[in-house]
Every structure is written in structure tokens, then in C-alpha cells.
Amino acid sequence: MTDEHDDITLDADNLDDSVVAEESAQETVKKLRGKLKEAEEKAKEYLDKWQRAQADFVNLRKQDEEAKTEFLKFAGAGIINQLVPVLDSFSLAINHGNKDAEAIYNQLFGILKSIGLEESNPIGEIFDPNEHETIGLTKVENKDEDHKILEVMQKGYILNGRVLRPAKVKIGHFE
């Protein structure tokens, strides 16, 4: 009868070589995992940078479009500024009863209004130095009229929300 242990022969050299090979393989796997982790971190870093650059580009494009729109809103401000005295002359002629001047004024103002011009005729409003220019004070007995615009001496004009020429006004002064 043979002993069960006789079938198993352990070769110490083979055992040492397989252990060394396994340890070497584990070390290689560990190094490869480290390199993979570094590569994944680099890839994430590059992706983040690319996404930021993409967002910056989109924002820059939006800013450029807004700047173009803003430029176009006020591109005609110079010529409109030159036409404002013409509107004043027509208003003066209308106030003196010239009916022909009224039609021309309405036609000219209609064209300018279509590109964003508005009249500022602020009677009854509170005085705002950003929109109005005071040329005189009028004593008032009612405290509610203090700093209110009582008379417009010259209309102001606003182009697309920006004061082109402030209205010249007289305001109430309560003592």
C-alpha cells in the first residue's frame, strides 16, 4: 500500500519560482493600476480644462453678440443728436401755429422713434439729475410739489434707454 503523501512531491525550487512570479505579477499589476489612475486623472484634468475653455468660448461669443447689439442701438446717436435741434425747431413752429410743421415733425419723429428715440416731457415727475437739467426753482406752497417738475422749458430725448439730452426743467421748491 502506498502512502497518500507519496504522490505529492514538493519541489522547493518550483515553489519559490511560482511565488516570485506571482509577486512579480502582483507588482506589475500594482504599477499598471497606478499608471492607469494617473492617466485617468490626466484625462479628467484635460476634460475639465476643455469644458472650461468651451464655456469661456460660449460666454465670449455671448458677450460679443451683446456688444454688437449695444453698438447697433447707439450707432446712430451722432446723427440723431444733430437732428434733435431740428425737432426743437419744428416744435417751436408748431407752438406758433404752423400746421405744416406739425406733419413734418410727426413724420421725422416717427422715423426716429422707430429706431429707439423717445421724448422726455417729465411734467409732474420727481426731479432726477440723471435725466433732467434744472434751470430754475419755483416756490410752492404745497409740500407734495417739492422737487417735482412744474415746467418743461426744453424736451429731453432718450435713445434706447440712455439719455441723449436731458430735459431742461423748472422744479418746485417748498420752504
Image: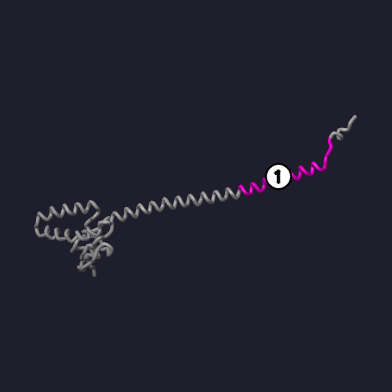
Location of residue 145 (image quadrant): bottom left
Picture coordinates of residue 117 (x, y %)?
A: 23, 55
Residue occupying image coordinates x 28% and y 54%: 73
Q: Residues within 10 Å of mark 1 (few under 14, many from 20)?
A: few
Closer to us: 36 or 88: 36
* Up-down relation of residue 175 to residue 41 (above or below): below
Location of residue 14 (image quadrant): top right
- Give the farthest residue toward the top: 1
- Give the farthest residue toward the right: 1
- Give the farthest residue toward the bottom: 175
Residue 14: say if magenta.
Answer: yes
Does residue 143 appear in this view?
no
Q: How is the image coloured?
A: one colour
Does residue 86 appear in this view?
yes
Picture coordinates of residue 142 (x, y %)?
A: 22, 65
Picture coordinates of residue 149 (x, y %)?
A: 22, 63
Closer to us: 169 or 115: 115
Q: Amino acid at mark 1?
A: Ala
Q: Is residue 109 left or right of residue 63?
A: left
Quadrant of image for the C terminus: bottom left
Q: Is residue 125 left or right of residue 67?
A: left
Residue occupying image coordinates x 11% and y 59%: 93
Picture coordinates of residue 18 (x, y %)?
A: 76, 42
Which residue is labeled 1 in the image? 25
Residue 43: say if magenta.
Answer: no
Residue occupying image coordinates x 38% and y 54%: 63
The span shown in magenta is: 8-36
SS under mark 1: helix
Closer to us: 44 or 25: 25
Q: Is residue 172 left or right of residue 58?
A: left
Closer to us: 134 or 114: 114
